[in-house]
Amino acid sequence: MAASTAVDTREPLAALRSAVLAIFVFSGFFVIVEPSPYELTFTLALLVFMATGMSLHAAITPMVLTLIVFNVGGLIALIPMLEDRDAVTFIAVSAYLALQTIFFASIVTTSPLRTLETIRTAYVGAALVASLAAIAGFLDIAGLGEMFSRYGRASGTFKDPNVLGTFLIPPAIFLFQDIVTGRRPWLRGAAFSLIVFAVFLSFSRGAWGNLAFAGLVMTFMIWNGEREASTRLRIVAAGVIAVLGLVALIAIALSVSELRGILLERASLNQSYDLGETGRFGNQLRSLPELMTLPLGYGPLQFRHHWPEDPHNVYINAFASYGWLGGIAYLGLIAATFGVAWKLRRVSPVLRRHYYAFWPPLLAVIIQGAQIDTDHWRHFFLLLGVVWGIHAADCRMKNAAQPVRRAASSGQVPNIRHAR
């Protein structure tokens, strides 16, 4: 009777937590205004989860420590320019995003399966709304072109087409995984096609590469981890359909004069702002010797005052905006994350599906950081926190299983609480 009562009191609480989390993640699709609903709903989610129970597992300690040191480096670099409102805001946002990362890791650790399903569902919903807005804006449906497009490219509910494109990659990967594993493939296929079309209309080279890379990595992981012939057959079929769809999409775009010019321009690797001594990559290389002599870097958002534009490289920006301390901490965070991903090769079967879904898009963003500043991308910190949370949940489950193995050898099997 007591056990039944305990379940009855926990379930409404779990439903409340899931609802608040879903609202928070779903609100990520709208960032035209700042502070965005995502920031406001995070405050609500944090308060609800703190009131109903949150805990930090020892397994996420490296992530927490490197994030703290990273932001301390930013605070120290900020000291000479406290009167610069933009610089102060920049560091405040960095700290806020670090807190969000710890939040995601904590809640995934505590209740992994329910939390991960909630995040996936809400993120896909957010992506569908953003995609519809992007398509409507690009096609100027109902006069929405001015609001939901920029520079002749789809931006949807984002200020920048590039950020829209990369925001849509994780949910596209979630859906593609469900397609190849047989989870309502036709319904998921329709949603996947809509999102991929919006990614295409963003004309973001980074997003295109991000999608292709993450999709290939996840496909390899599933192929390597799943031995069932039916799953591998679906992978081949989905791959063929995806390639044919891409070819058809490119052919249609090339046949429309308005699209042809944008496509050829964006597909070119020889962009004027990238090349030459004063181009993006030239500025990055020329800044390195100078940054090696500046322990505090240039200061938050000050790179643009020393060179023609922002660094467009998150690793250089880590040293430029957060100083040596912050830069080294950021590299440590990325290195530790790779270490966690390596350990998760042997993740518990119950968590494997989610690891296959969240790690490839995170890896893609980490690599993409070499050509764009990703240190304030909200979905990067969501992915980062979730992967570390999966690692911590995996550690919890394996630690809980150890007494079972020991007891089984002696003929006694204790009761343990399974992840929910």
Image (cartoon, rainbow, N blue to C red):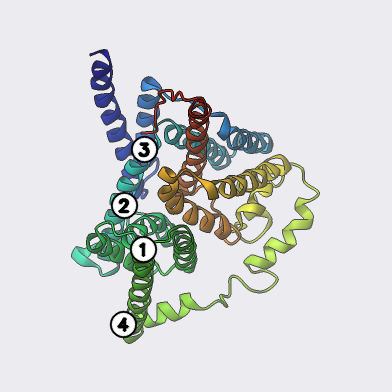
Figure quadrant of the C terminus? top left
- The residue pinned by badge 3 equals 115
Residue at left offset 48%, top offset 29%: 408
Precedes in sequence: disc 4 or disc 1: 1
Residue under the point 45% across and 44% down: 382
The numbered disc on residue 124 is 2
Q: Which residue is mark 1?
A: 231
**Looking at the image, is mark 4 or mark 1 nearer the viewer?**
1
Q: Earlier in the sequence, mark 2 or mark 1?
A: 2
Residue 5 % position (x, y) = 24, 16
Whole-Å distance between the Cαs marked 4 and 1? 31 Å
Give the structural element (helix, strand or loop) at label 2. helix
Alpha carbon distance from label 4 to label 3: 40 Å
Give the amino acid type for the residue marked by disc 3 in the picture: Thr
Considering the numbered disc 3 on the image, is that residue within a helix, a strand or a loop?
helix
Is disc 1 surrounded by few (<14), some (14 to 19) or many (20+) residues within 10 Å? Answer: some
Question: Are the residues flagged by discs 4 and 1 in contact, CB closer than 8 Å?
Answer: no
Give x and y (percent) for residue 184.
24, 58
Q: Report how many numbered discs are placed on residues in the image.
A: 4
As displayed, is residue 273 above or below residue 57? below
Q: Is residue 326 left or right of residue 193?
A: right
